[in-house]
Image (cartoon, rainbow, N blue to C red):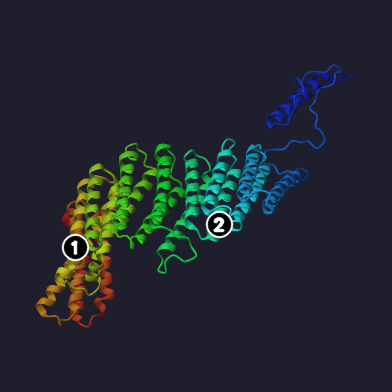
Amino acid sequence: MPQPDWEGLEGEVRALAQRIARIERELGLGRERGSVGARPANGDLDLPKLEQGEGLREPGAHPTPAALFPLLGRALLGLAGAYLLRAITESGTVGPQLGVAIGLMYAILWLVWAARTPAALRLEAALHSLTSVLVLAPLLWEATLRFHAVSTWTAGAILLFFTVFGLAVSWRKDLLIVATIATLAGLGTAAALLMATHDVLPFTLVFLAIAAAVQASACLNHWLSERWLAATTADLAIVLATWLVTNERGLPPAYAPIPHAWLLTTQVSLLGIYLSSTIIRTLFRGFTFTGFETAQCGLAFLISVGGGLRLASADPRLGPDMAVLTLACAVACYVVSFALLDRRGARGRNFYTYSTFGFLLAIVGSRILLVGATADAAWSVAAIACMWAGGFFGRLTLQVHGGLYLLLALVSSGAITQATAFLLGDGTWQGEKDVAIAAGALAAGLCYALAVHYDSGRREWGFQVFRLAAAGAFAWLLAGISAGLLTALYHGVFGEMASHAYCATLRTGIVVGSALLLAWAGSRWDSLELSRLTYPAMVVGAYRLVMEDLHQEQKAALFLSLLMFGAALMALPRFKKAGA
């Protein structure tokens, strides 16, 4: 009968014991027992022993009820200490100010205890943090509202200190739960005190200071998930303060005064906090724009500039100042986009976000500073400048911005509306009143000419689509001017009471004539965008024929319309060949 391999079995058990001991050391559960795997004198293996109630616990695992009860007990003892301090303060043994100071230190001690808790024990850290909050928040509430031991400014300073201290002590172990609870406590208590005391300014500054602290941490890639908490409260507080000051009824009597200078300071500070932190993260740290940063920067601009404009009713100088600030930010965004990011070849989300902000801020700033035809002219000039720069440097993004500036100018001035009325409605040329459509056609023509000059050899789909859009806008405006002038000439010759049926025929003739001209020019100069506009022009002609010409009483006019449209359909292929 073969003997068992006791030595091999002993080696396997020893190896298993070593692995168990190594796991215990990594989890911090093991105890020093001498050299692992050494054989004692009696010949037994020195296997790790589990004492009663001890077991492996993975990080983040749910504790058993037996382990949870002591944690809850410690939390209740902490609250008991807070109530004891309150009783001592109410009895007059210690003064209210001293009681608040002792309570603050007591809450800080619980927060430090939470920060010293191992990172794996998240529930324990959360309970200690909540105990700290449950000590501080009621104490500060009663000290401010009931005992009047501290002012609203002092209460705000205490909340700011508590929040920043919580962020600081939780930094080393990256205890997000401790930082989140401290931030929520500071923001929530400040919001409650703001509504209860009707003193908006000190707690708005608390929100801004906490937002600045969180954003400073975010620049070091800490506490990113907490940013929306601070941003939301800061945004809402400034919106509330702006509405209280600028509403028609004025500041309600129950609220503490809010000086305009302080309110303007908070608005500018909100913009400065998120603009500077975003620049640091995206330009100096190399992080990509997040959805939060994009949305919050947009909201900060909206709240700051919009609030400043509402204050401008009391101080007219604020309007131009806000416009200059906005335009300066627009220029900075363009410089960052095309002078820094584009030069590095980093045409990613950061490039497009900065360039888009530059475009939007330029529109807002120019609209604040300029009105009416002056703004339309400025946008037309910006469109031509962007078209030239985009074509000269080969930047499609700048050309797209130029097209958007042009579209904005055409819509704002009414040029598109006038051209549509001339072509599809019954509008007639009004002389000097129609200068907008003439100026729009000139700007569109220059933009299209620049696009053709610089991009004629480019076959990328982006440049082709852009040239098609520019050619379409120019052709539409030019056809509208032709229709307006031709119908005005008709009424000038035959009188204002002449039949409008022939005006409809003339408009249809302009549309189908434009289609033939586009077909010939597209083939003659090998212009793909002009050739592609031929068939949309014929569709517009068919629409006019069905919706307008067929409903006219003069059958002779209808005959002429049908004749021109049919002849155009027959001649269209020949015009393309003739151009070639």
Q: Secondary structure at mark 2?
A: helix
Read off the residue under disc 2: 193
Q: Which mark is residue 478?
A: 1
Q: Residue furthest top?
A: 41
Give percent across and percent down for residue 477: 21, 63
Q: Quadrant of the N terminus?
A: top right
Q: Secondary structure at mark 1?
A: helix
Q: Nearer the viewer, mark 1 or mark 2?
A: 2
Q: Nearer the viewer, residue 177 or 414?
A: 177
Q: Is residue 400 shown above or below 246?
A: above
Marks 1 and 2, the one that precedes in the sequence:
2
Q: Nearer the viewer, residue 34 or 562?
A: 34
Give percent across and percent down for residue 529: 25, 54
Q: How packed is label 2: few (under 14 Cα within 10 Å), some, or many (20 or more)?
A: many
Q: Nearer the viewer, residue 57 or 311?
A: 311
Is residue 111 at least partly visible in the picture? yes
For badge 2, the amino acid type reads Leu
For badge 1, the amino acid type reads Leu
Q: Which mark is residue 233?
A: none
Q: Residue at x 32, y 45 (%)?
A: 332
The residues bearing labels 1 and 2 have C-alpha atoms spaced at a distance of: 64 Å
Q: Residue at x 14, y 80 (%)?
A: 496
Q: How packed is label 1: few (under 14 Cα within 10 Å), some, or many (20 or more)?
A: many
Give percent across and percent down for residue 206: 50, 50
Mark 1 and mark 2 residues within 8 Å of each other at the beta carbon: no
Q: Residue at x 43, y 43 (%)?
A: 277
